[in-house]
Amino acid sequence: MAAVAIVTAGAFSTVPGLLVTPLHEGYGWDRGQIALATAVNMVLYGLTAPFAAAAMDRFGVRRVVLVALSLVSVGALLTSVMTAAWQLTLYWGVLVGIGTGSLTMTFAATVSAHWFHRRRGLVAGGLGAASHLGQLLFLPLLASAVERYGWRPPVVTLALAGLVVAALVTLALRDHPADRGVAPYGARVPVPKPPPARGAAARGVRVLGRAARTGPFWLLAGMYAICGATTNGIMWSNWMPAAHDHGLGATVAASMLSLIGVFSALGALASGWLTDRLDPRRLLAGYFTVRALTLLALPQALAAGAGPELLAFTLVYGLVDVATVPPVITLANERFGAEGPVVFGWITAAHQLGAGVAAFAAAAARDLLGGYTLVWLVLSAVCLVAVPLALVLVPPAATDAATDAATDDATVAPAAG
């Protein structure tokens, strides 16, 4: 049931890209105005995640998921009757952003921790991939429906699907195995249900305060903000209008975006395997270098149409799209220990902040310049900025050695005096 909820939320995430051209042509709104809603959506998507996890510990998983699905459904229904650009920002940016942000990797981590004693990593990875599955399943269908029936019927249909899933969640999803009187998978005996956690949200803020006083946090956050800008930020809301500028139909463009999702899943699995065996810093440097080269080649690939060059782009770009996740999680856990998962939640917020800025800036640049060519080139250069950010991260052993040396010096100095 958790996977079904995540798949449904994933289907909402790529809809704004399908709406840019219809809303621009139908209402005469600037692309920048439309992209503002996407930017707000992405920022709230990231900022909501740490607090949604705390709410699940306090109020239970089922209640939070039910509220989240209700928010995305209501937001989509209100979007279908909007008459002004600010309403798109409120309905899709705020309501859908908070709702989908509650059904992210923190939700997957909570479910895997409660229901599985063994194979938690596999379950968390599978639930994380479910979001991409939602995009893969629904994006081409939604794009075809928008071309045939206009944008409102698909949005309303998706909203109703969200309400149906919310009803199923009420009936089938439980907060903990103890609610059903069973043991977590792989455990020999049932585990008592923990009491509602208090102060979890405050702990998240305290962890952020401690992490923000360290250099590694800002290096990881800055690098991940660049990652968000050059993946979600540009692709979710600007890929479809960019493809439209080059004469590609909505269904073809959506299919290409879905292929990126397929290769993203494969790349994430391969990256997880490599992260266990190689230096994650060097992996990140390699991923950002490859991403920079693909974005540099994208204008020519789009100009060539739906042919071998564009297919090659979807393959290579897709393989490094989500590949950054395992190395960043590993680095966060190495440097922040038990607080690593919470720190990663805040680093993910930086990812979504970068995505939101890029979504708005790219659309505004398209309105100003009449095309996306300069956008691709700038993002390619920005990817190269992330390469040294990854490489200058000091390995934990070196950090510990430096700390020990500083402590020894501090101890010796008074004695010498």
Image (cartoon, rainbow, N blue to C red):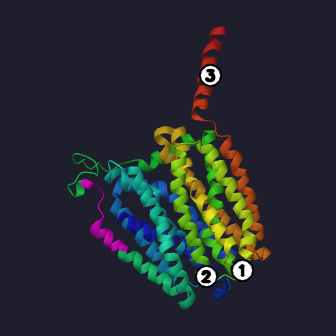
Q: Which residue is mark 1?
A: 245
Q: Position of residue 86 (x, y in %)?
A: 60, 76
Give SS at disc 3: helix
Which numbered marker is on residue 405? 3
Quadrant of the image containing the N terminus: bottom left
Q: Where 188 sits versus 132, above or below?
A: above
In the rendered structure, the answer to whether residue 233 lies left or right of residue 50 reads: right
In the rendered structure, the answer to whether residue 198 lies left or right of residue 49 reads: left
Q: Where 322 sits versus 161, above or below?
A: above
Which span of residues is magenta-colored? Answer: 165-177
Q: Amino acid at mark 3?
A: Ala
Q: Position of residue 388 (x, y in %)?
A: 71, 45
Q: Amino acid at mark 2?
A: Ala
The residue sitting at the front extreme is 308
Q: Crowding at label 2, few (<14), some or many (≥20) Cα neighbours within 10 Å? A: many
Q: Crowding at label 3, few (<14), some or many (≥20) Cα neighbours within 10 Å? A: few
**Do tag 1 and tag 3 residues touch (Cβ < 8 Å)?**
no
Q: Position of residue 179 (x, y in %)?
A: 23, 57
Q: Nearer the viewer, residue 188 or 269?
A: 269
Q: Amino acid at mark 1?
A: Asp
Q: Which residue is mark 2?
A: 250
In the rendered structure, the answer to whether residue 2 lies left or right of residue 30 reads: left
Quadrant of the image containing the C terminus: top right
Q: Please report the residue visible at 29 percent of the width from the left and 52 percent of the height from the top.
A: 185
Q: Is residue 167 magenta?
A: yes
Mark toward the start of the polypeptide (1 vs 3): 1
